[in-house]
Image (tube, rainbow, N blue to C red):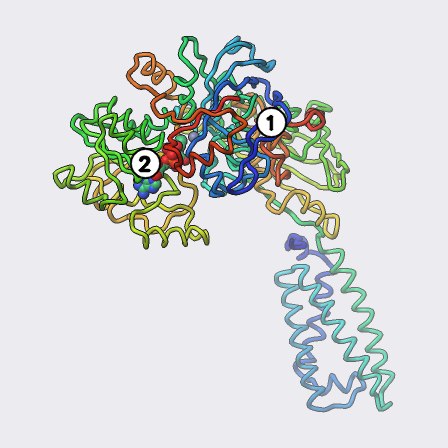
Amino acid sequence: MKANCWAGPDSVEVRDVPEPALLNSRDAIVRVTSTAICGSDLHLLDGYVPTMQDGDVLGHEFMGEVVETGPGMTDGKLRPGDRVVVPFPIACGACASCRAELYSCCENTNPNAGLAEKFFGHPTAGIYGYSHLTGGFAGGQAQYARVVLADVNALKIESDLTDEQVLFLSDILPTGYMGAEMCDIQEGDVVAVWGAGPVGQFAMDSARVLGAERVIAIDKETYRLEMAAAEGYTTIDFEDVDVRSALLELTGGRGPDKCVDAVGLEATHGATHVRLYDRAKQAVRSETGRPHALRQAITSCRSGGIVSVVGVYGGLLDKFPAGAWMNRSLTLRAGQCHVHRYMKQLLRLIEQRRIDPTRVITHRLPLSEAPRGYELFKNKEDGCEKVVLTP
Amino acid sequence: MTTDTSAPTALRHDPLVRGLGLASALLGVPQVATPGGFVRQLGLADGPRQRMATVAVGVRELTAAAGLLGRPHPAWLWSRVGGDLVDLTLLATALRRHDGRGVARTAAATAGTAAVTAADVYAAVTRTRWRTPVELTAATTVAKHPDETYELWSGLERLPEFMAHLAEVRITGPRTSHWTASAPFGRTVEWDAETTQDVPGQLIAWRSAQGAVVGNSGEVRFHPAPGGHGTEVQVTLRYSLPAGPLGRAVARYFGEEPHQQLDDDLRRFKQIAEAGEVIRSEGAPGGKRARAEFPQHPAQPLTEDELREVRS
Ligand SMILES: NC(=O)c1ccc[n+]([C@@H]2O[C@H](COP(=O)([O-])OP(=O)(O)OC[C@H]3O[C@@H](n4cnc5c(N)ncnc54)[C@H](O)[C@@H]3O)[C@@H](O)[C@H]2O)c1
Ligand SMILES: [Zn+2]
Ligand SMILES: [Zn+2]
């Protein structure tokens, strides 16, 4: 079958690989009908995530039709022919973390947990197509994919919603939602969102659904800011103005009540010298992220506010504003999304047309053109916001 | 790796060790008290250089005596062997440069020292435990009742599913079992084990029977976790590696950090207890062999041949 593979930093290739087989008894094989490229894939592409290997099949946002189930699937939870969306973290459903609905911290699904523990102190869940640090699972940018412990890790779609309407339940919609939910939004709250990529857009939509009075989008890509403005959000272009001053101006000097970092470790900065400083440190690996957005969010947030981080960080950061965080009683919340926790409620929001996930899709390409899709998405060419691939 | 640590108490009552300690004392006292007389006794020319060397040897002997009689340890025996070799060298040099007067006494002293050296080597070799004892501990928490968790372990026959190096455990009697483990160079090691303690829901302890190549013992304890959230599983493993190349090969085979091996084993135990089986990825399709496989199979579906190998 065809699959999009990592072929070294800055290079992906569609290759012929074997079709997936069941490895665990409750696995299912899915014929992929739609899959997408995520901002997290760009961190892999750019070589910021260790333990990638040549030939790793990429992709953690995918859905499709079940074609085979393992012998352990005895409860009839999943049958060939079922249409499913697959959450990107692999959960066992039985460990203490899964029972606490912290699915991306599942204690059982990462076969390389010993390695992950070295990086993070404790291991985290397995993730499809996301390095060997998260288990070495083949991803879903392929014609077929194995869904691990599929009775726990697949949401059946029984209505006639299109693929494009439900595909993002696999990751970015729940991720954006969790970013907003962690803000514990109260009536009258002003929520600022760093990053107007797909995750940021859904964090904004979710903040509105959760009752934010005003939502502010921060980015430098004009077309992405326009996309946010079209939804009625206030925008700040960080290349034109000083973000903190602009935010204070928009909030009567208070600063936003809640802040969401939907940028992560590859942030850029409006001021060249700051950008170069962090780029250089990251290049020699003395810090593993460029935390411009996170620093700004912490220094801009009002005292006692919440900074919610869904942008991905991997290792160590430099110049973390611990003084602002501590002295001003800020709450910092973060996590890889616990997707399973949100899928059903978000499916309802989609059915009720309160959230329209299709609004971020700008490019539809066949799987064979995945490398072109990565290029468009990474370089922000041709107004690219989100690429959906069809095998 | 460090050799030995024989129990000092056993050495304290060892006649050979005590005898050698006394010999050291008897030799050391005159060497330090009257070095000139001692030198002449050996039939050597008396001079300040010779006296100084004799006092130094005497101090060494007294130190060894204090060690062997006071805090016996095989290291003192080895220090005696080292001292003997120095003495033999000195005496040999003296013999070569001898002016002839009293040469018979010097020759006799040399022969005597050679005999003492033989006794020292014998004592040091036989009193040193040529094994490297290793003790490993690891713990995990399983979201299951202690009874269920105990049950899963006490069958013993499922241990090879999660313990990387175990190939098979067969129950051979009410308290006995036969274990097979993979070993370096594609070989296997087998031994019989005896269950020494078995308290349902709480504790299982075992010990290899006499004659095992890698003698080992272990125990696993099951405690209710705080708040009734399952079971804390605590494992202790003890084994002693044979010294020399075999021990080194075994040690290398078990990995540079054997405690990580045990951590991984326990993680897989938890997977079986909670998720029903060891989780496999395309990168680590062998499940329990994951750590040894770096760089792993790419995160890409396996070929028919690879699948066959994994399933065999
Ligand atoms: N927590 C999770 O579970 C989870 C899930 C999916 C994605 N993510 C992460 O979320 C982040 C965003 O994902 P995406 O798909 O939207 O990616 P994306 O790359 O499309 O979006 C990032 C946006 O941030 C903007 N940006 C860069 N520097 C900035 C700065 N200093 N201030 C404000 N904006 C800045 C970029 O211009 C871009 O538009 C990534 O780090 C991704 O890995 C996390
Ligand atoms: Zn993603
Ligand atoms: Zn779990």
Q: For the residue labelled by badge 2, is the local secondary structure a helix, a strand or a loop?
A: loop
Between B289 and B180, the one nearer to me in the picture: B289
Residue wearing tag 1: B198
Residue at x 28% of width, y 16% of height? A354
Quarter of the image for residue A29 reads top right
Percent x, y for residue A251? 15, 37
Asked whether residue A61 is in view, the answer is yes
Which quadrant of the render holds ligand 1?
A: top left
Quarter of the image for residue A225 reads top left
The amino acid type of the residue labelled 1 equals Asp
Percent x, y for residue A352? 30, 12
Between A2 and B286, the one nearer to me in the picture: A2
Percent x, y for residue B45? 77, 90
Between A126 and A54, the one nearer to me in the picture: A54
- Horizontally, residue B270 falls left or right of residue A310, namely right
Residue wearing tag 2: A195
Task: Output the chain of dot 1.
Answer: B
Percent x, y for residue A323? 25, 49
A160 shown above or below B275: above
Residue at x 80% of width, y 82% of height? B93
| Mark 2 lies within 8 Å of ligand 1 (Cβ measured) | yes
Image quadrant holding the N terminus of chain A, namely top right
Furthest toward the left, the residue is A252
The amino acid type of the residue labelled 2 equals Gly
B308 shown above or below B87: above
Q: CA distance from mark 1 to mark 2?
A: 59 Å
Residues flagged by tags 1 and 2 on a common chain:
no
Between B111 and B155, the one nearer to me in the picture: B155
In the image, which disc is placed on residue B292? none
- Horizontally, residue B265 falls left or right of residue A228, namely right
